[in-house]
Image (spheres, helix red, strand yellow):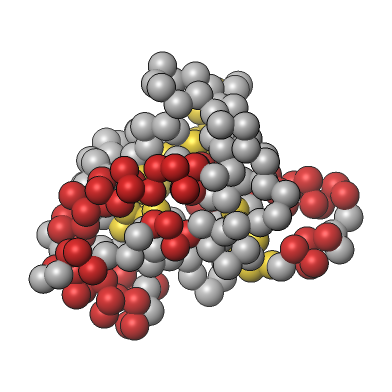
Amino acid sequence: MIHPDTEIRFIDQIVGYGVVATKLIPKGTITWVQDELDSVYTDQQVASFSPLMRQHFETYCFTNGQGLKVLCWDIAKYVNHSFRPSCFTTAYDFEIAIRDIQPGEQLTDDYGYLNLDEPFEPVDEGCERKIVFPDDLLNFHHTWDAMLHEVIPSIFRQPQPLKPYISKATWSDVSRLRKNPNEMRTVLNCYYKKLGKVSTQ
């Protein structure tokens, strides 16, 4: 489930639609939670789809750390990629704002943690990285973990409208980070090693 203070808008002819904030979403706000309405599929189930439906499905799904394909039921599936994202995943099945997101600004992810099957070349943002590779999690998890360590304390200072959609067990694990931040699970837990993954790094 995506944060309630968001809506889908047409961005431009290149990226198409995206998800933007309708109000200020402060740093540390949980912006997305995987919930019970999100559909989860095995590779075998996806293979049974018609070619046309499989093409649509692959456009909007992501692969989790267990190798399952997840299709969000709401506008979360329209969140675009950025090498300078406004949101970032955690190993707790939710994402957080890693900086303040202003009204009208896109909520973006780094597709590098979505276990892509093939390299993806997005719009050039003028940064060092130009291509998203299937094994980006292996190469950048230390950097991403360090960034999350800096952001995680903000979770406990912000209102969290999506908290009711997080299981009690998961929130209990997250709450322990208030006193013991070094117990944070690494985002490397989100990585799924699949035979045939392509990388040209």
The location of residue 38, given as percent across then percent down, is 57, 66
Residue 131 in the image: state x and y as whole percent.
Answer: 54, 28
The correct choice, above or below, for 55 with respect to 17 in the image is: below
Q: Position of 25 compared to 40: left or right?
A: left
Question: Horizontal and vertical percent for residue 71?
Answer: 62, 59
**Residue 172, percent from left and from top:** 26, 80
- Which residue: 62% across, 37% down? 199
Q: Nearer the viewer, residue 162 or 167?
A: 167
| One can see residue 24 in this view | no
Decide if residue 99 is on the left or right side of residue 56.
left
Which quadrant of the structure image shows residue 22? top left
Q: Is residue 12 above or below residue 95?
A: above
Identify the residue shown where x is 44% and y is 42%: 139
Residue 200 found in image quarter:
top right
Q: Going by the image, does 108 lie left or right of 37?
A: left
Residue shown at the point (38%, 37%) measured from the top left:
85
